[in-house]
Amino acid sequence: MTHDATTAPRWTREELQAAFAQGYEIGRAATARGKVADYIPELAKADPGAFGLYMLKPDGETLSFGDAETRFSIQSICKVIILAAALKLRGFNETFSHVMMEPSGDAFNSILKLDTRSNLPFNPMINAGAIETVSLLLPDLGFEDMLACARELCLDPSVTLNEAVYNSEAQTGYRNRAIAYLLKSKGVMSADPEQTVDLYFRLCSLSVSARSLAGLGLVIANDGIDPFTGRILIDPEHVRTIQSIMFTCGMYDYSGKFSVNVGVPSKSGVGGGIVCAAKGPMGIGLYGPALDSFGNSCGAVKAMVHISQALRLHVFEY
Amino acid sequence: MTHDATTAPRWTREELQAAFAQGYEIGRAATARGKVADYIPELAKADPGAFGLYMLKPDGETLSFGDAETRFSIQSICKVIILAAALKLRGFNETFSHVMMEPSGDAFNSILKLDTRSNLPFNPMINAGAIETVSLLLPDLGFEDMLACARELCLDPSVTLNEAVYNSEAQTGYRNRAIAYLLKSKGVMSADPEQTVDLYFRLCSLSVSARSLAGLGLVIANDGIDPFTGRILIDPEHVRTIQSIMFTCGMYDYSGKFSVNVGVPSKSGVGGGIVCAAKGPMGIGLYGPALDSFGNSCGAVKAMVHISQALRLHVFEY
Amino acid sequence: MTHDATTAPRWTREELQAAFAQGYEIGRAATARGKVADYIPELAKADPGAFGLYMLKPDGETLSFGDAETRFSIQSICKVIILAAALKLRGFNETFSHVMMEPSGDAFNSILKLDTRSNLPFNPMINAGAIETVSLLLPDLGFEDMLACARELCLDPSVTLNEAVYNSEAQTGYRNRAIAYLLKSKGVMSADPEQTVDLYFRLCSLSVSARSLAGLGLVIANDGIDPFTGRILIDPEHVRTIQSIMFTCGMYDYSGKFSVNVGVPSKSGVGGGIVCAAKGPMGIGLYGPALDSFGNSCGAVKAMVHISQALRLHVFEY
Amino acid sequence: MTHDATTAPRWTREELQAAFAQGYEIGRAATARGKVADYIPELAKADPGAFGLYMLKPDGETLSFGDAETRFSIQSICKVIILAAALKLRGFNETFSHVMMEPSGDAFNSILKLDTRSNLPFNPMINAGAIETVSLLLPDLGFEDMLACARELCLDPSVTLNEAVYNSEAQTGYRNRAIAYLLKSKGVMSADPEQTVDLYFRLCSLSVSARSLAGLGLVIANDGIDPFTGRILIDPEHVRTIQSIMFTCGMYDYSGKFSVNVGVPSKSGVGGGIVCAAKGPMGIGLYGPALDSFGNSCGAVKAMVHISQALRLHVFEY
């Protein structure tokens, strides 16, 4: 057994097709075990049986299964875009003087450690960390700037704001407001808490599809470069940072298990989406609003376990 | 920029030599900022200026710098060996019905989550998880079996027990006893708590060198196969599990930062050692008893930041 | 030794005079060891050496020492008035379906337990409990009503709002806003969080003197009856509840020690005030803005230790 | 309404008889709602319907209802005896340099705060605090000394060790061992952890009756003096300390509510006993092994609510 370069991932069209087709079937079957998020009315309207999968490669090769074009709200996956924007605007050192990069082992919306271990949020993938990171964008970047950024990173000019979701979030996001005021009280947030959560609620309400997420995944997997234009969208060093943090913190309290069982930098949202930045490089977007107890799409997790094994996508499968 | 197979890591002897030589110098200089552990007298005797580095490849190529043959106690690095042994003896499912695989975000010796979030320790790299994992070895495996296992995995037949360290640990390890009794009280540990901590103390007291750790790192990086005999020492699926857990949980409260800045599955111990399972494959062992505030060897961390960047060892640097 | 009725507290004018005069001297000397609160600029302006003491009995007997007429902001002592008002407006059962009555053992502004143990604040003397209790007053009672209530309970028609303190609180009270939004997010608060904290900030900014606090203490010690008019201001059953909660929770993290060393139902505020409802009955108000590490007035605590011992005021000194 | 001495508690024989008879009936009826403790087999053998009540006054007057002579294990009520013995042996200052006197707001067997807030247990009524306090008795006092002390304080020479309960406790008391080792690891315990928990297990296994507890309650209520011999068993200052701590911490997580609803210094145990040191003075012992969710005897709590109201025993009912 050797690890030289010729063993790097490379698949025939048939191998790819087979792996994703099987992953899709496995995932679709698993949706029955999940439950659609209902903390805001707009999310509760989703079809629990919906399931879609989209794969995109730098050479333009794509695979699409099921509800790959259905629009849903990006929710926590926007944390990846927020982190990328903050790193670009403020740089590595300033960004990480406001938020740490350690897995927290606590729930995504926990404020426990913020009040007992550190004034800084543990990482940008939990709500407290994402809200702090959003505050770094202000006042230089507003929602229109971030919308443009999201469209660019998702390789999808049709990403828009879902006003209904935004209104729901804004009216009921008491816990996120509590987090923002807590950060403000600790002196680690300069921006106005209300403006900060407003921008955060808008970014969580971006309307995307599995296809948009595949675009985002590809840009990240491709070292931050848009493979179709050659433009550098994210600095390569920032890409490694983002991938590492997605790997250790991207899947809520299931992050450790996902890193063992799938081993691909990923981020999920309670809207049912998952973005994966896989070797190849390859961007994979999944959508299945039926969630497991961790808040991850049931179907998408099962699909990725299969696809990763079939294509040997685990980062420690050299 | 492309990601096809020809960009996989491959270095000339000169490139390797230069990267490690510079890493060694940087690391040695950084020892001045650390402090030798003193919670047991035996550890406090270490020379704070000591620093060593050893690299081993499957083709037998080695690099050795400084105190690479100095013996020190393995301490928490034994958790990797314990996990490998438990996975082999009990299998994946039984092992992970006793310990989770999530980063905890708490101190290595914390019992907070054990008492508030879950009856199962968060992962096998914190003390509670390692002690629970040791209990799974009993009564089938005793210290002699585990010593043999350690020698095999470290490719070093001269690994022995440091009796003085063991006696110190056994006499003062009150917190680890508390953890064992707490696990027993929760009904998740079948073995006797005293026998369990005794075996744990012995395994923490194994006497190794940077060279032994390079051996251990190479076996892990080489998919569990002893490259010199071709024997499968660890099942490949278990190797990926071990690497993922080392990546997310291996460096105490610095694990997230290390995964961003170095990006190589690693495990450190308060004896001053760090084992790294790097791409190539390559095993890297480091020794520098002067520790930073996280309990990691100051010099070894700095050395690895440099070496990883110079040789592009970060797992997300495809 | 007997416990029959004739041993109940009764003192000559000289005994009272001596005990309070000595208590005043001891307290005044102790002010040198404390530090004025500085979390809002208005508090930081207080004279750290100020110290005052006022005693009031139902027969109109009074004792006054030092800065007994100096005005300062009531701060956390308003929690007693808030609780009395909520009990009157909503009754015992409804009030305590929104807030518990257990000592928390955590800091006064902690949100730890709120997020881990219970959705209900532990008691009405911590910020979270007081904010929840204020929300129960809305929309039936506004600030003017509560001001009237405070004047009545303090037997002091000149209690007013300190606008400067209120403005400071309102502008910087981020943590209290965080608590209000957290309570709202848990579904235990019906009122609007912003209106709730606004009323809370106003009540914390009431301008009182040691004399006003002596009035409040006397009403409580006198079973809720204004001794000069005979009017029932607080229902006797509510008075016992208030006294019990003051006894177990009134002095921040020093409550247990104060109950052992002084043994008189009391409540302190970071403005430097302490109200005591003592046997006799007797109302004691103290003022000393130099605070100890628990947030209690240094001088006032020392004075009360002496006075309680001298006059045998401890509740378990029958 | 006045508070002068003539309103101190004084009841006719008929009033006492009626209050206790009604309390007994109310308590006996309430036993149906509770559940016998089953964490050790010996406790599970208790008759869930058993209920007994004993009242003792310094003039020798007694009242006895139901199973007032049934023997049961004292369990946590021994913490009162331990505290009295430690205060006598080591004095106030040394004792409280090892354990605090603050209510904790956490479960009786919690180790949370011990690991996050303070190295010292919060108070002597939680397990950690009682175990630390037991360690202060060693090596000067052994079990025989403490048995003699218990007999004296309970005015009951027939208090003995229940060997079966002790053996159960000793074999299964893993969590208490964990607590002892944790305290040892923090350097706050000088004694041997195994010897400490052994003595603690024995003291928890003392066999008492409601009558014994009435004796203990009377001694405490009578300022530490055995009313039948005039001997000072507990220093009066220590008695006030013990009563204050019983009042704020004696009834597990129900302590705050009990202080409001009953207002009498009391301590409960999971064996089903409650000791009350009431005004009068009066010692009240209760026994009902059917426990509520807090670990307090269902029937005994209900009985005391009635008796306290009927006889105006609340400490803040002057």
Image (cartoon, coloured by chain):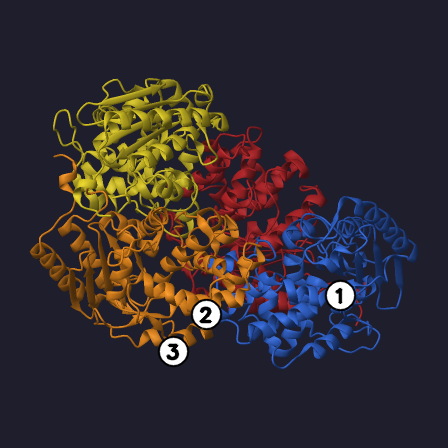
Chain colours: A red, B blue, C yellow, D orange
Above or below residue A248? Residue C37 is above
**Residues at marks 3 and 2 touching, judged by CB atoms closer than 8 Å:** no
Mark pair 1, 2: CA separation: 44 Å
Task: Name the residue at the bottom extreme.
Answer: B140
**Picture layout, residue D28 above or below residue C136:** below
Front residue of this view, candidates A182 and B198: B198
Amino acid type at mark 3: Ala
SS under mark 2: loop
The earlier-in-sequence mark between 3 and 2 is 3
Residue D15 visible within the image: yes
User: Which residue lies most toward the right here?
Assistant: B14
Label 3: chain letter:
D
Q: CA distance from mark 3 to mark 2?
A: 14 Å
Does A155 sit left or right of D213 as displayed? right
Circle 3 is placed at which residue position? D164
Q: Residues within 10 Å of mark 2 (few under 14, many from 20)?
A: many
Q: Which mark is residue D173?
A: 2
